[in-house]
Amino acid sequence: MYKVTQFSGKHSHPVISPTKSHFLKSHRKVTEVAAAQIELASLAGIAPKQVYELQSRQAGGRENLGYLHMDHKNYLRHKCQENLDINVAAAILKYFRKNLSQNQACYFDFQLDAEGQVTNFFWVDARSIIDYSLFGDVVSFDTTYRANDYGKPFAPFVGVNHHNQTIVFGAALLYDETSESFVWLFETFLEVMSGKKPQAILTDQCAAMAKAINIVLPE
């Protein structure tokens, strides 16, 4: 049981000024007009930062725009995910299944989110599985490559053979770079490779990736 012994009606912290109220989540919203401009600019290939600056000037300053640059990017990300779900996911699955029907040694898998939407893809062919069994002691894994239209991380597992030639052990198209996605990917990769773990893995400096490696590949 709690008992009130004293009450103070004064704020215990400085009240935010009107010029900074646009930072509050309750005051931020991408309007229909702004959303239409964002989508049109994206189709025209204009960078989000440039669009945000233009809209800020039209509104007489960022404090009058009604949302932050982060909200702008999140809106585009959400629209891209909708397009990925509707237009691309089915085509990717159809492509993988076609390859599998032609070569049973190929493998692909995908992850679903809580709403049953496809998020992450992983695929590998027969040659990659053989190469990994021979040269999979050291693996390079990088997600900094984003040349696709949706800005999704493309994540290849790469190594070298006895001729110092680059070889691909597998690849993934990720929806995001969370530790949960990386854990799923590493576990799926090891399952395909009969549980063989690399002795060393080279990655970029990503905290979520490091966390997943400590979970799945603690050695």
Image (cartoon, rainbow, N blue to C red):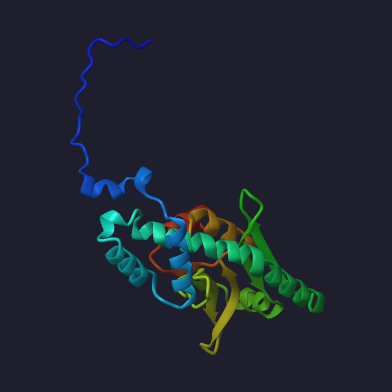
Measured from the top left, where is residue 157 in percent x and y? 55, 73
Q: Viewer-proximal residue, 8 or 104?
A: 8
Q: Which residue lies most toward the bottom here?
A: 163
Above or below residue 102? Residue 14 is: above
Would residue 204 be found to the left or right of residue 89 on screen? Answer: left
Would residue 98 be found to the left or right of residue 7 on screen? Answer: right
Would residue 44 be found to the left or right of residue 13 on screen? Answer: right
Measured from the top left, where is residue 124 in percent x and y? 66, 73
The residue depicted at 63 percent of the width and 79 percent of the height is 131
Is residue 195 in view?
A: no
Is residue 121 in view?
A: yes
Q: Viewer-proximal residue, 136 or 212?
A: 212
Q: Viewer-proximal residue, 144 or 79?
A: 79
Above or below residue 170? Residue 8 is: above
Quadrant, the N terminus: top left
Asked where in the image residue 216 lies, by quadrant, the reply is bottom right
The residue depicted at 53 percent of the width and 59 percent of the height is 182
Measured from the top left, where is residue 73 in percent x and y? 42, 62
Asked where in the image residue 134 lies, by quadrant, the reply is bottom right
The residue depicted at 30 percent of the width and 61 percent of the height is 59
Above or below residue 146? Residue 196 is: above
